[in-house]
Image (spheres, rainbow, N blue to C red):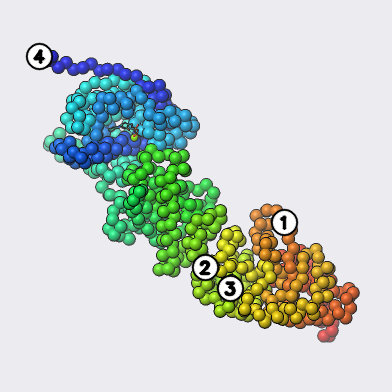
C-alpha cells in the first residue's frame, strides 16, 4: 500500500552564524557596484555547467535529451523578478544545505574579517572569498532557488530565503537538471530588469564565459504569446582561445583597442598557448605609445587575468615585472582557483611560473621586433627604453636578454639614431678590448667632451649615455659578450694595443713635467687630488677624470639636481704634454718656480677643463676676471 502523496511542508532552517553576519552586511551595508551579483550568479551557473559536462564525460547518457548546455536570463517586469537558470549539475538536498545554507565555507569568515568599510573594496572582496551567491541579497528581498541534481533520483528541491537568517526547503517539481533562480528585486534594484542594463553587465563580465548565455524575451509579433526568443549575449569566443593562425592582424588590433581603450595600434603581439604541467594562454601586446602616467609610482598596470575564461581582474601586476609594465594583454589559466585573491596572487607558485614565462615571451617579442622591424623597435625604444633600463636595477634575471635590447646614441650615430651593444661589438677596432661609453647630460655635452679626443683620433666608437637612468644601468651592466664596459672619463685609460705610442710618450713626458705637476697639484689641492700626464687628449690642454670608483661628474650633477647629498670627491687633472699652453707653462715654471702669476694660470686651466666637459665652475666671475687679465696682456703686447 502506498500513502497518497501529500506535499511535504516547507522545512525551516537557520543559516549558520557567520552566514547570518554576511547576509546582514550584504543587505544593509554594501551599496556600491551591486551589479556584480550577476557576475557571481553567472559564474556559479558556468561552474555548474562545467561540473555537469565533466560528470557526463564518463557517462554521456546522464544528459538525456538535453545535451546542449545553456545559461538563461529572463526579466519578468510585471512581477519584478529576474530569472536566471542553468542546466548544469544542480544540487541534492544535502548539497543545498552544505553550499548555501547552514555551513559557512572558510571564505565566509575571512570575508567578514576583511571588511574595511570602504564600499568599493568590500564589494570587490565578494568575488575573492567564495561568497558570491549571497551577493544576490544586495539586490533581492526574496530568492527562490529550485534545483535538480544531475544523475540523482532525488526529487527537485526548492530553497527560499529573504536573507533574514533562515531559509526554507521543500520538494518541488522541476523537469530537467540544473538550477533556476527567481530573484525578487528590491525597489531600489529595479534597474536590473532593464534589458539594456542586463546585456551590458553580462557583456562586461561574462563575454568570455565559454557557455552560451541567452537573454530570453517574449516574441514581439503578439500572435503567439507564449513563444519566446533567445539572444545569445556572448557570441564571440575569446580571441586568445582561438588557434594562433586563425586570428588576423585586424582582429588583434580591434581586440587590443577593446582591451586597452587605446585607439592606437599595437606595435607587435605574441600569442602563446602552453600545455604541460601548467596550462595557460598568454596574449601580449606592445603598445606604440607610452601612457601619460607611465612613471607614476602607483599607476595600475599589468595584464588581465582570466581563469578558465572567466574574467578575474584587470591590471594584475603580479604577471610581469615592473620594467615590463608597458605591456598589455591577457593571461588565461586553467590551474588557478576562480576565487583567487590579490593576496593569494603575490605568493602563488602558478602565478610566478606564468610571470616568468610572460617575461621571457615579452623579451623575445622585443628582440624579434628589433631584428625584423628596426624602425618599429626604434619607436618602442623612444617610448619605453627608459623603463626597460629599470630592469638592470636589483634584478639578476634575464640580464643577457635585457642587454641585447639596450640602445644608445654614439659617436657613430646621428642624433636620435641608436646602436645596440651587439652592433658596437661587431664594429670594434682590431686590438680594441673594451666597450667605451661616456655619461653626459645630453648629446651635445658628450660630443664636446675632451675625454673623447683620443677616441676620435683612433676611430674608436664611444656610446653616449645621456639618459639619467644610464648611470644606474652601468652599475649592473659591467660587461657584454665578454667585453668590459669602460667609462671614457674615469680611471687610467688603457686602449691596449691601440695606444702603444701614447703610452710611450706618456712615460717620457712624466719626467719632463714632474715639477710642474707637483706644483700644480699643491696649489690646486682644494679642487683636484692628483695631476698626471694623459693619453686621452689630442687638442685640449687638460681634462678632469674621476677615479674608477668615484661618482663622476654626470652622476654628481644628477644627484645634486634631485637635491641629494653628494659626497665631495676630487678628480684627477690630466695634462696634455703636447699642448703649447702646457709646454709654455712648463717653461714659465722652470724659469721661476716662484712666479706669482702661476696660480692664476692653474686656476684657469682647471676651470676650462670643467667647462669643456659641460660642468659648472665654482666661481664664474673670478674666472672671467682672470681670463680678461690674460687677454689685456696679449692685446697690449700686440699693440
Ligand atoms: P563559490 O562559487 O566561490 O563556491 P558561491 O557563494 O558563489 O561560492 O557558491 C557557493 C556554492 O553553491 C558553490 O560552490 C556551488 O556548490 C553552489 N552553487 C551555487 N550556485 C549554483 C548553481 N547554479 N548550480 C549548482 N551549484 C551552485
Ligand atoms: Mg561563485
Considering only order in the chain, which callout, 3 or 2, is on the residue closer to the N terminus? 3
Residue that numbered label 1 is attached to: 567
Residue that numbered label 2 is attached to: 481
From the viewer's side, name the closer residue of 284 and 207.
284
Q: Which residue is drawn at 27% across and 17% down?
A: 11
Considering only order in the chain, which callout, 4 or 3, is on the residue closer to the N terminus? 4
Task: Identify the image quadrant of residue 585.
Answer: bottom right
Distance from disc 1 to disc 2, alpha carbons, whole Å, reads 33 Å
Residue that numbered label 3 is attached to: 433
Considering only order in the chain, which callout, 2 or 4, is on the residue closer to the N terminus? 4
Distance from disc 4 to disc 1, alpha carbons, whole Å, reads 102 Å
Q: Do the residues labelled 1 and 2 touch (CB within 8 Å)?
A: no
Q: Residue at x 54, y 73 (%)?
A: 413
Q: Do the residues labelled 2 and 3 touch (CB within 8 Å)?
A: no
Q: Is mark 4 within 8 Å of ligand 1?
A: no
Element type where label 4 sits in the image: loop
Distance from disc 2 to disc 3, alpha carbons, whole Å, reads 11 Å
Residue that numbered label 4 is attached to: 1
Element type where label 1 sits in the image: loop
Q: Do the residues labelled 3 and 4 touch (CB within 8 Å)?
A: no
Q: Quadrant of the C terminus?
A: bottom right
Picture coordinates of residue 275, whole percent (x, y): 33, 51
Element type where label 3 sits in the image: loop
From the viewer's side, name the closer residue of 192 and 303.
303
Distance from disc 4 to disc 2, alpha carbons, whole Å, reads 92 Å
Task: Identify the image quadrant of residue 619.
Answer: bottom right
Query: Could you tell me if residue 58 is visible in this image?
Result: yes
Q: Is mark 1 within 8 Å of ligand 1?
A: no
Crowding near pointer 3: few (<14 within 10 Å), some, many (20+)? some
From the viewer's side, name the closer residue of 639 and 82.
82
Amino acid at each position: 500500500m502506498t500513502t497518497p502523496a501529500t506535499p511535504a511542508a516547507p522545512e525551516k532552517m537557520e543559516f549558520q552564524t557567520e552566514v547570518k553576519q554576511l547576509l546582514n552586511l550584504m543587505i544593509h551595508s554594501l551599496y556600491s557596484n551591486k551589479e556584480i551579483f550577476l557576475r557571481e550568479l553567472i559564474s556559479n551557473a558556468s561552474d555548474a555547467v562545467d561540473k555537469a559536462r565533466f560528470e557526463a564525460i564518463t557517462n554521456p547518457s546522464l544528459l538525456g535529451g538535453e545535451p546542449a548546455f545553456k545559461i538563461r536570463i529572463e526579466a519578468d517586469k510585471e512581477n519584478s523578478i529576474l530569472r536566471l537558470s542553468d542546466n548544469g549539475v544542480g544540487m541534492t538536498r544535502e548539497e543545498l544545505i552544505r553550499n548555501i545554507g547552514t555551513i559557512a565555507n572558510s571564505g565566509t569568515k575571512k570575508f567578514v574579517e576583511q571588511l574595511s568599510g570602504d564600499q568599493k573594496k568590500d564589494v570587490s572582496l565578494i568575488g575573492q572569498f567564495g561568497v558570491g551567491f549571497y551577493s544576490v541579497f544586495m539586490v533581492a528581498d526574496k530568492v527562490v532557488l529550485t534545483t535538480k541534481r544531475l544523475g540523482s533520483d532525488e526529487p527537485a528541491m526548492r530553497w527560499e530565503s529573504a536573507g533574514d537568517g533562515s531559509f526554507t526547503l521543500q520538494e518541488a517539481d522541476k523537469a530537467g537538471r540544473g538550477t533556476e533562480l527567481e530573484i525578487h528585486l528590491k525597489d531600489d534594484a529595479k534597474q536590473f530588469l532593464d534589458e539594456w542594463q542586463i546585456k551590458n553587465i553580462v557583456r562586461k563580465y561574462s563575454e568570455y564565459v565559454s557557455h552560451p548565455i541567452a537573454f530570453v524575451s517574449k516574441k514581439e509579433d503578439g500572435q503567439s504569446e507564449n513563444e519566446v526568443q533567445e539572444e545569445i549575449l556572448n557570441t564571440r569566443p575569446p580571441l586568445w582561445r582561438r588557434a594562433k593562425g586563425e586570428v588576423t592582424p585586424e582582429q588583434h588590433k580591434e581586440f587590443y583597442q577593446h582591451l586597452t581603450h587605446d585607439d592606437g595600434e599595437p606595435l607587435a603581439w605574441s600569442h602563446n598557448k602552453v600545455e604541460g604541467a601548467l596550462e595557460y594562454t598568454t596574449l601580449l601586446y606592445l603598445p606604440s605609445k607610452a601612457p601619460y602616467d607611465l612613471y607614476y609610482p602607483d599607476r595600475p598596470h599589468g595584464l588581465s587575468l582570466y581563469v578558465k575564461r572567466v574574467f578575474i581582474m584587470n591590471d594584475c601586476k603580479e604577471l610581469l615585472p615592473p620594467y615590463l609594465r608597458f605591456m598589455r594583454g591577457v593571461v588565461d589559466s586553467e590551474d588557478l582557483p576562480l576565487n583567487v585573491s590579490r593576496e593569494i596572487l603575490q605568493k602563488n607558485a602558478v602565478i610566478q611560473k606564468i610571470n616568468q614565462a610572460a617575461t621571457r615571451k615579452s623579451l623575445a617579442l622585443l628582440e624579434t621586433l628589433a631584428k625584423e622591424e628596426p624602425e618599429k623597435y626604434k619607436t618602442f625604444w623612444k617610448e619605453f627604453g627608459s623603463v626597460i633600463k629599470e630592469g638592470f636595477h636589483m634584478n639578476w634575471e634575464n640580464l643577457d636578454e635585457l642587454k641585447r635590447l639596450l640602445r644608445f646614441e654614439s659617436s657613430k650615430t646621428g642624433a636620435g639614431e641608436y646602436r645596440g651593444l651587439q652592433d658596437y661589438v661587431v664594429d670594434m677596432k682590431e686590438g680594441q678590448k673594451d666597450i667605451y661609453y661616456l655619461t653626459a647630460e645630453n648629446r651635445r655635452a658628450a660630443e664636446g667632451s675632451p675625454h673623447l679626443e683620443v677616441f676620435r683620433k683612433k676611430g674608436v666608437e664611444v656610446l653616449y649615455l645621456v639618459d639619467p637612468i644610464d648611470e644606474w644601468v652601468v652599475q649592473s651592466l659591467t660587461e657584454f659578450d665578454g667585453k668590459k664596459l669602460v667609462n671614457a672619463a674615469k680611471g687610467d685609460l688603457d686602449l691596449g694595443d691601440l695606444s702603444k705610442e701614447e703610452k710611450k710618450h706618456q712615460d717620457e713626458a712624466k719626467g719632463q713635467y714632474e715639477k710642474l705637476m707637483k706644483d700644480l697639484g699643491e696649489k690646486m689641492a682644494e679642487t683636484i687630488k692628483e695631476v698626471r700626464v694623459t693619453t686621452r687628449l689630442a687638442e685640449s690642454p687638460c681634462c678632469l677624470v674621476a677615479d674608477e670608483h668615484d661618482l663622476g661628474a654626470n652622476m654628481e650633477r644628477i644627484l645634486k639636481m634631485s637635491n641629494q647629498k653628494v659626497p665631495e670627491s676630487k678628480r684627477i687633472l690630466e695634462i696634455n704634454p703636447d699642448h703649447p699652453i702646457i709646454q709654455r707653462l712648463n717653461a714659465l715654471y722652470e724659469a721661476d718656480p716662484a712666479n706669482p702669476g702661476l696660480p692664476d694660470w692653474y686656476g684657469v686651466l682647471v676651470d676650462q677643463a670643467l667647462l669643456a666637459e659641460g660642468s659648472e665652475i665654482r666661481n664664474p666671475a673670478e674666472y672671467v676676471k682672470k681670463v680678461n687679465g690674460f687677454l689685456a696682456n696679449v692685446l697690449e703686447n700686440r699693440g
